[in-house]
């Protein structure tokens, strides 16, 4: 991969006064820095941008792309700060000062900026008038009409919630039926099977995948979903010290109660049932191991469907019935006759779940399903949206309701993702093919660099090295937009059963939900490993994904590779530090996930691994400065008591190790392609630019309430992620010439993969 400025190789003759003017323009004229983008045709340096040939003086690039890159970088920075004292302020000070909260959000970061940009493009696509004079595919018209039905709040209010209240699920929800209702012969498997037929199960997940190059057609994977509240809130609420979280956990009970009351339940009954369900959620979470689970092919066993229940060893769950119901509903009927691969990701979880459910009355179990299912269906009317907003406000997520267009484009994307992809690529990239090649190459180069680093670890056995080098990052996307792929030839077939265009919004959504399951089966039979119905577990087999086509790992989606994270026009140091840092983080997080399993280390390796872990733990506990109070101290200590369960330590290690990996990948690129040109008007040579780009990935501005709540919910701050990464980098200290013993040239440097 190479940034555009590397490929230009423009070391042409130009009077240096032009570069001097660039410096004056950037440093002397700060108007517009926040917007920070010049366009073709704009006048700068006394010339029109489209007349500029991209000339340079002494390795300084002065074309319009370089000017834009420099402006954007500097607008996020505070170059008056001392990078050796507070690199967070140096890299992100301008971001903290200039960014504003929009649309009721309580945080601004790279994700929210990119999400806003992407949604603007997608909204512009669906809001285009239907072109009756120019034939367009029928599914495009259906897509636009679905979006309009979502935007039609008057009709939604007129339709009300009758669609749900008349459903079987509502009529069998004890909270809505009455206080004493529960059938005498309650059958847990009947309940789970019924909801599996609706592709819903709050107790465990069933994922169906396609194996690339395998004679097996499908894979069923049992895992553990998240229940109710976000996992970090549940961990916090279960802590030994009440830091104000248990009172907020009560708000979740109130949220469930308010939903039921709005649906017609008695307030007292709803309150009692909500409390019982919330208590059950906590109990279930207590038996969950970390969200980050070990991934080894040895954990998989090939089983016939008839063998599943017996071999899984959990007679209280009829996996055969449940999987059959799921497969039928999801249109994966061939699964019922083929061999399938079952992975019991958490044996201890199912044993614990059996004990909990045997001690829980059937009313609470039914209500658990009822509450959780209702949340997925009824949040469409004004009053229901108000209930949801109240909940989000209490947890610091929003200050006002999300713009309706944002809600509706998310719904539209959910059902028409592939139909949106091609027009999105046309509008989001000047050259989508070139950008795709850039991203794919960066992914591959990072993998090669990681293999080289692992190979050179002296304390690690060859067996351990082999295990780690075969790890592939799981599919993980901060913004779950579509795979960077085009399947235009199949879209007509894919959407041929789309009959959603003439009904109400809810009816359209239900119709499309059914269609979506058919689309999943269609997709899987043609394109292995590009579908993710639920949680996707990665094994060594997955690395066979097609690297010669569009099948880049789905994390690297077209929507993800947007400015400010990536641009085809950025210098290589910028792209390798920013997007390259994210890719490196994924690789290292996957490797750390395996490394956190003590079973892989020999007796000789354990002391070395434990020594590295202790270094990071000790460093985190001493992350205290004048901006942190006693509450933060107690949180820091509490955080590490939870680390064994949540493996948050893996994130801290991955952040630090990812910097080293991204830097090594960039240096390998420089070795073959050169450093490229420096940017005009900004005192950042390529070496410094790399570290700034890496750090700016973590720039985040939060409202005071959101910041406090995130401390309580044990979320690692962007500030700490920046500082801890740079503390442990000798290359950073050298690039900025930080004196030994200065705050950013940490005396003790922790490293995992050395």
Image (spheres, helix red, strand yellow):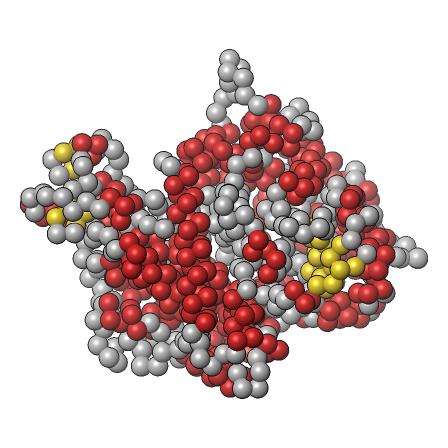
Side of 480 relative to 686 (left or right): right
For the point 62% across and 78% down, which residue is it? 599
Side of 430 relative to 587 (left or right): left
Does residue 694 appear anywhere in the picture?
Answer: no
Side of 204 relative to 721 (left or right): right
Residue 426 found in image quarter: top left
- Residue 154 image offset from top left, x and y in percent: 60, 29
For the point 11% across and 35% down, which residue is it? 46
- Residue 299 image offset from top left, x and y in percent: 69, 67
The image shows residue 126, relative to residue 663, as above or below, that is above
Furthest toward the top, the residue is 133
Q: How many marks?
A: 0
- Residue 479 image offset from top left, x and y in percent: 50, 49
The image shows residue 699, relative to residue 439, as above or below, that is below
Camera-side residue: 250 or 627?
A: 627
For the point 25% across and 33% down, which residue is it? 40
Residue 315 found in image quarter: bottom right
The image shows residue 512, relative to residue 225, as above or below, that is above
For the point 70% across and 63% down, which residue is it? 300
Q: For the C terminus, which image quadrant?
A: bottom left
- Residue 483 image offset from top left, x and y in percent: 53, 44
Camera-side residue: 45 or 438?
A: 438
Does residue 119 appear anywhere in the picture?
Answer: yes
Camera-side residue: 585 or 283?
A: 585
């Amino acid at each position: 991969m190479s940034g555009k400025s590397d490929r230009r190789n423009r070391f042409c003759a130009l009077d240096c006064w032009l570069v001097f003017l660039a410096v004056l323009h950037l440093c002397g004229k700060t108007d517009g820095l926040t917007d920070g983008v010049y366009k073709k045709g704009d006048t700068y340096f006394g010339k029109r941008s489209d007349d500029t040939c991209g000339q340079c003086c002494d390795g300084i690039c002065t074309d319009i792309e370089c000017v834009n890159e420099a402006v954007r970088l500097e607008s996020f920075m505070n170059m008056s700060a001392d990078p050796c004292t507070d690199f967070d302020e140096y890299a992100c000070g301008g971001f903290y000062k200039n960014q504003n909260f929009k649309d009721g959000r309580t945080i601004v970061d790279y994700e929210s900026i990119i999400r806003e940009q992407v949604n603007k493009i997608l909204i512009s696509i669906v809001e285009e008038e239907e072109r009756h004079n120019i034939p367009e595919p029928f599914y495009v018209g259906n897509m636009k009409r679905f979006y309009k039905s979502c935007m039609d709040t008057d009709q939604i209010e007129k339709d009300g919630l009758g669609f749900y209240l008349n459903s079987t699920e509502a009529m069998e929800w004890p909270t809505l039926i009455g206080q004493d209702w529960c059938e005498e012969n309650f059958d847990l498997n009947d309940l789970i099977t019924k909801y599996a037929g609706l592709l819903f199960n709050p107790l465990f997940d069933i994922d169906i995948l396609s194996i690339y190059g395998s004679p097996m057609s499908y894979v069923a994977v049992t895992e553990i979903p998240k229940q109710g509240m976000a996992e970090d809130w549940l961990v916090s609420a279960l802590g030994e010290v009440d830091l104000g979280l248990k009172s907020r956990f009560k708000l979740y009970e109130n949220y469930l109660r308010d939903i039921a009351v709005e649906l017609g339940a008695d307030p007292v009954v709803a309150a009692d049932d909500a409390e019982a369900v919330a208590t059950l959620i906590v109990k279930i979470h207590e038996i969950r191991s970390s969200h980050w689970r070990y991934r080894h092919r040895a954990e998989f066993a090939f089983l016939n469907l008839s063998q599943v229940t017996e071999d899984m060893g959990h007679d209280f769950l009829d996996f055969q019935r449940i999987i059959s119901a799921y497969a039928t509903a999801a249109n994966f009927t061939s699964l019922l006759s083929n061999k399938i691969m079952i992975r019991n990701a958490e044996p201890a979880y199912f044993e614990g779940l059996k004990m909990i459910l045997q001690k829980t009355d059937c009313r609470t179990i039914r209500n658990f399903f009822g509450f959780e299912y209702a949340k997925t269906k009824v949040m469409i009317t004004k009053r229901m949206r108000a209930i949801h907003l109240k909940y989000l406000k209490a947890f610091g997520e929003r200050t006002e309701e999300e713009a309706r267009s944002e809600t509706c484009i998310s719904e539209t994307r959910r059902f028409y993702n592939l139909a949106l992809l091609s027009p999105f690529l046309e509008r989001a990239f000047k050259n989508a093919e070139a950008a795709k090649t850039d991203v794919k190459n960066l992914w591959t180069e990072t993998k090669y660099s990681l293999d080289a680093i692992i190979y050179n670890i002296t304390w690690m056995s060859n067996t351990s090295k082999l295990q780690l080098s075969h790890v592939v990052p799981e599919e993980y996307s901060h913004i779950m937009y579509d795979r960077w792929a085009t399947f235009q030839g199949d879209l007509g077939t894919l959407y041929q059963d789309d009959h959603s265009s003439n009904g109400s919004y809810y009816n359209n959504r239900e119709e499309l939900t059914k269609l979506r399951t058919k689309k999943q089966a269609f997709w899987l039979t043609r394109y292995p490993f590009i579908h993710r119905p639920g949680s996707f577990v990665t094994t060594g087999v997955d690395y066979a994904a097609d690297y010669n086509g569009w099948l880049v790992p789905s994390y690297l989606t077209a929507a993800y590779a947007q400015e400010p994270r990536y641009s085809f026009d950025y210098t290589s140091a910028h792209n390798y530090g920013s997007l390259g840092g994210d890719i490196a983080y994924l690789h290292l997080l996957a490797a750390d996930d395996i490394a956190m399993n003590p079973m892989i280390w020999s007796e000789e390796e354990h002391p070395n691994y434990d020594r590295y872990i202790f270094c990071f733990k000790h460093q985190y506990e001493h992350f205290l400065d004048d901006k942190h109070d006693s509450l933060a101290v107690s949180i820091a200590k509490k955080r590490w008591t939870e680390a064994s369960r949540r493996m948050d330590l893996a994130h801290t290690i991955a952040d630090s190790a990812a910097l080293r990996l991204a830097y090594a990948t960039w240096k390998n690129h420089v070795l073959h392609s050169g450093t490229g040109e420096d940017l005009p008007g900004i005192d950042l040579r390529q070496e410094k630019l790399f570290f700034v780009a890496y750090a700016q990935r973590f720039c985040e501005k939060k409202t005071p309430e959101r910041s406090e709540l995130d401390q309580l919910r044990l979320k690692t701050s962007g500030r700490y992620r920046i500082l801890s990464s740079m503390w442990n980098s000798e290359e950073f200290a050298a690039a900025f010439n930080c004196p030994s013993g200065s705050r950013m040239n940490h005396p003790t440097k922790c490293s995992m993969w050395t």
